[in-house]
Image: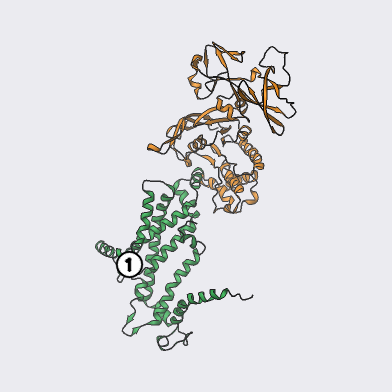
Chain colours: A orange, B green
Amino acid sequence: MATIRLGQIRHAYGSGRTTEEVLFGIDQVFEGGQAYALLGPSGCGKTTLLNILSGLLRPTAGVVTIDDKDVTLLPPEQRNIAQVFQFPIVYENMSVYNNLAFPLRARKYSHAAMKQAIDRIAEVLDLTDLLSYKAGKLSAQYKQIVSLGRGLVRADVNAILLDEALTAVDPYEKWLFRRKLKQIHKQYPHVMIYVTHDQSEALTFADKVIVMNEGLVLQTDAPELLFEKPATKFVGYFIGSPGMNFLPVRREGVKLSLMNNHLCSLPAKISKVGGQAQAASRIDLKHIKNWELGIRPEYITLDLKPNKTTRNALRSANFKVKVMNVTQLGSTNIVKVIFAGHELLIKVTEATRLAETVYIGFPPDKICIYGDGVLIA
Amino acid sequence: MKFKKRYILLILYLLFLLMPIYWLMNMSFKTNEEILGQFSLFPETFVWDNYITIFTDASWYSGYINSLIYVVLNTIISLSVALPAAYAFSRYEFLGGNHLFFWLLSNRMAPPAVFLLPFLNFYSSIGIFDTHLAVALAHTLFNVPLSVWILEGFMSGIPKEIDESASIDGYSFPKFFVKLFLPLIAPGIGVTAFFCFMFSWVELLLARTLTTVNAKPISAVMTRTVSAAGMDWGLLAAAGVLTIVPGILVIWFVRNYIAKGFSLGRV
């Protein structure tokens, strides 16, 4: 069970005047046997982080340790980490068998052990019939599968890093390979890190999802938590389709309210829950300027008539709003309404009846409170 | 198969192209009397004497041996220098890299005669005049830049991710370079070797000037065949035929990649 730790990793490309900083101090622990998904928009530093893990890049500052051994300065070949790139990389002059054998030869596997490992991986990835083919003659998809196989063939690696490794694979076969990856991963105690900018891929694949943006890790959590309690406004917006709705709320003393409806009370001293600010912890709520409420489009209730049975105005569908438009997405519809001058998106089932004006409500247990963009409660 | 009109030009072209080579072979199997005496499309008295002389007379066959030694030596030196250089140019960005790369090629723009005097004087003073090494080294001045350019083209066709991938697969740089990278650019190396070989094999001026006896190349031997009995035409023709043979052999091995080589590895 290898544990990989990143300590205050910073990285900048270039030097002198043309320096471009891409990572701004990343602390992260990767535990053996866990599958992680690294999720973030293009250009947020995912690949850079991966290359620092594998040793292709030396971080400008910070420490990488594998099982408490400092490997920051070690080259990739001494780290025993497998990495699969976004684009298929095969050794074109070799057969598929020799491609798969290549990493094993470097580690001096015996002939029998090598054959066994290759047969096993070839069977899982359906490459058995292709073993004697020249890798250069394969289609892009099979090349990608061969490079995947080369990453997975070593059973004793510390970690397997997959950099959007299924990009070249047909969409309808992607889920199949994702399942195969999980299946292979279950047999071994290594860390698996899957980089993607596709959230559905990340949420279905990983035990834990790491959301990155602009060179910072915003949240590391199980997919459910990421959905229910996004640590920052960015995570809320980035995860989910469509993203989270945000509404400004008023603070009077320790009380927060939305349209004169009491939301919740805060203690005078609070701690930020989310983001990199975790360590900064307790801050005075007076210092927070912007208070906002976040709610998922899935959780807003919608009715044709006002519901007067419950006292809680937030829970019951009690705010009268005008429907602007409806986008149909097959089994669900996205309803856009205007609420107190703000656009809100509501996800309802196809069967939900709609009118020009509807009544909406916010279940209190599904509401997240953000202070200056960071999750408070 | 029906004869097509458009083949006529092709056949004429081949005819003109092969004419001198055919005539050379024709001459090499004739006696001097027949060569000088009459016009004949085929040798009337077919003789092997000319070839026998070349393979038995040390002053002739040593010319081939000398040429082959310095040509091979030159090819080895050029490749072993150009391979790391081309790798650096194709993989790293360094200060003045592009300028240096272009400047390399400008070395080839000077005629070999320009370097005759410095080479002659320098090699004499360090005592390697009239050795195979002298010619081989002199030819590297022209072959290394070309080799770097051709190899760089071939290497740039291999994505950098291959290097990274090999490193991740557990190969240190030297191991990667020998076990993976060199086989990958093998066609490039073959074509480069061919260009080095051909330049060095046909170059006359430097080879003749930098040698006298011990390393005298075949091209120099051929220019000095005027004896007391006059020109030995048949012998000269036989030597000419034998000089073409290595070129044909080398071309045969790299025939599929020569076009890419002429475009300096850039497809």
Label 1 packing within 10 angstroms: few (<14), some (14-19), many (20+): many
- Write down the chain letter for disc 1: B
In-front residue for pair B216/A370: A370
Residue farthest toward the left in the current orientation of the protein: B125
In-front residue for pair A350/A170: A350
| Quarter-of-image position of residue A154 | top right
In this rendering, does residue B58 appear at all?
Answer: no
Q: Position of residue A265 (x, y in %)?
A: 58, 12
Tell me which amino acid carries mark 1: Leu
Which residue is found at the position 36% from the left and 58% from the top? B106
In-front residue for pair A140/B11: B11
Which residue is found at the position 71% from the left and 25% from the top? A356
Q: Position of residue A158 (x, y in %)?
A: 53, 36
Which residue is found at the position 39% from the left and 71% from the top? B64
- Above-or-below relation of A54 to B90: above
Q: Position of residue B115 (x, y in %)?
A: 30, 63
Q: Is residue B88 left or right of residue A360?
A: left
In this rendering, does residue A62 appear at all?
Answer: yes
Which residue does the numbered mark 1 point to in the structure image?
B206
Q: Position of residue B187 (x, y in %)?
A: 49, 58
